[in-house]
Image (cartoon, rainbow, N blue to C red):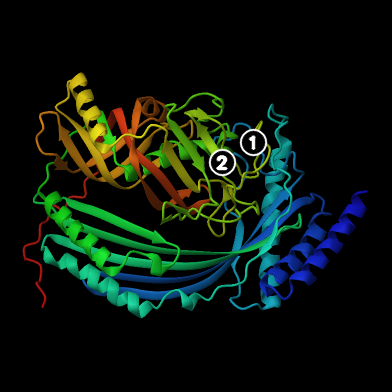
Amino acid sequence: MGRRISIAFLISCIFCIEGRSQQDPLLDILTEELNREFAILSKADIPAYYMDYGVNEINTVSISTNLGSLMNSSNSFNRLAKVNMRLGDYKKDNTHEIAGNNMGAGHNFSASSTPIALTNSKEAIQKALWQITHAAYLNTSKQYKKVMSQEADEDSDVPDFSKEAPVRSVEPPLDFDQYIVPSEWEVKLKNLSQVFISDSDIISGQVDLNFTLERKYFTSSEGAYIVQNMTYAYLNIHAQVRSADGDIIPVYKSFFAFKPKDLPKEQKLKEEVIDMVATLEKLKDTPLAEPYTGPALLHARVAGVFFHEIFGHRIEGHRLKSESDGQTFKEKINERVLPKTINIFSDPSMTQYKGQDLIGHYKYDDEGIEAQKVQVVQNGVLKSFLMSRSPLENFETSNGHGRCQAGLNPVARQSNLIIESLEPLSEKKLRKMLIDECIEQGKEYGYYFVDVTGGFTRTDRYNTNSFNIMPTLVYRIYVDKRPDELVRGVDLIGTPLTMFAEITAAGDQKETFTGICGAESGGVPVSATAPALFVKRIETQKKPSATSTDLPLLSRPKGE
């Protein structure tokens, strides 16, 4: 029976190659070489039961300006191929966690990968694939021997790899040049960064654009093949000002769209830069904040980062399988983990949320699984996790969240995280709740976190299970109705469950934070859309100082 299945599989793959040959030559080369390699390795002393090849074909334009000058304008084009290989069987393979390994599962997140020819040179590409496949087999077989040498563990009923129906989809290629004319954007960005020269204390004012067209290839020994296109236009504005005491204070703004033409128009961007200049002028004279514990408001952008860091990473399914992880929510399915007014879902199939392009969009994940909406929290109750093809007990299949950076192996990762409130309140009501709670706690003021550059978290059980959010704009809201006071040098810190317990209310306006999230499988594009939050108790610490003690002896050149 096994031999007949194998022969049928080979016939099926040959048919697939013939059917695809006019669609994408690179896909044909990948599939042909995969079939050749797998036919041999599946009969080796330690047989491979699964293989896939992936290629990320990436074309990027990068333009950088600073204080009115063009600093960089470049175009790069490359192809990175990788092989993902599994030995053993679906139930137990080389990725199985080794008991007592504090570093986590036996899975090596760094795949065997290599750059390949930029043209469809069959011989050159097949040779490169053969080399990385050989290296992958040697490394994987060593890991598999380690896995098999350990005693049987209690979690042996949970397979290491889920069985999924193969998906087949091929999109036609896109023309990169139709999306962007670099020379036009060079002029726009120089004009925008020129505005920062108006203040002599501003030491840098950068406006950068990165536009990427990525064509992703995937083909597997299970018969799946996918070719999909992804485009990303990311405009970043980053400026720094020197305060009177020498502290270097940054502010950031970023904008995302799938196409450069859908980014904000130049006049709108100029207004944003002028607003940033005004903010920088205020920040250079603001007081340094002291450590604080008490009530706070989180603006919608900050709340998005907050949920991404302290909640999103703790619902990524592969972590909950590892004994080295803190497993914050593993045993909390169908339990209330947030206020009953909060719903959360993750949906990579969404391209927009209320007109805003969502960078976490994709049609198929990096394991060849169709993107799916996952209702994670319903009325405050935890319902599901984000799953790759690494199963958990009661979560046997992927829901399309296996993701990775080019050249790495996929694990469960976030995509488009959407947080919604069933009882949204106006900002005016949230501010009143903040002031009332400050009075209740005997606080002179509460904090309002308005903007943020990012954050990080730790989820393993061998370090403090904490988070750190890095705000850039923070205000004190006084109970005696004094004007809000801008402060600097604040980081928002804490531990997840404690913080969740203090969330009391949410606002009626949502915003989307867009970024690149770094974790075991590299940097992947993600978004988080959330309303503002009122939290009864937060904790802050002083931000690491970027002070320059040697103030300049000469004033900055004025230029023309």
Q: Are marks 1 and 2 in contact (CB under 8 Å)?
A: no
Q: Residue 407, relative to residue 454: is it above or below?
A: below
Question: Residue 38: which quarter of the image?
Answer: bottom right
Q: Which mark is residue 374?
A: 2
Apparent side of residue 59 relative to residue 36 in the rendered image (left or right): left
Cα distance in 3D space between marks 1 and 2: 30 Å
First of labels 1, 2 by sequence position: 1
Q: Which mark is residue 98?
A: 1
Q: Disc 2 on helix, strand or loop?
A: strand
Q: Which residue is pictured at 33% across the width and 45% down the height?
A: 301
Q: Disc 1 on helix, strand or loop?
A: loop
Question: Residue 457: which quarter of the image?
Answer: top left
Asked whether residue 357 appears in the rendered view, the answer is yes
Q: Residue 24, relative to residue 276: is it above or below?
A: below
Q: Which residue is pictured at 58% across the width and 39% down the height?
A: 318
Q: Residue 509: x percent and y percent?
A: 33, 43
Q: Residue 201, relative to residue 67: is it above or below?
A: above
Asked whether residue 292 appears in the rendered view, the answer is no
Task: Estimate how packed mark 1 is, as few (under 14), some (14 to 19) or many (20 or more) residues with alpha carbons within 10 Å.
Answer: many
Q: Which residue is pictured at 50% across the width and 46% down the height?
A: 414
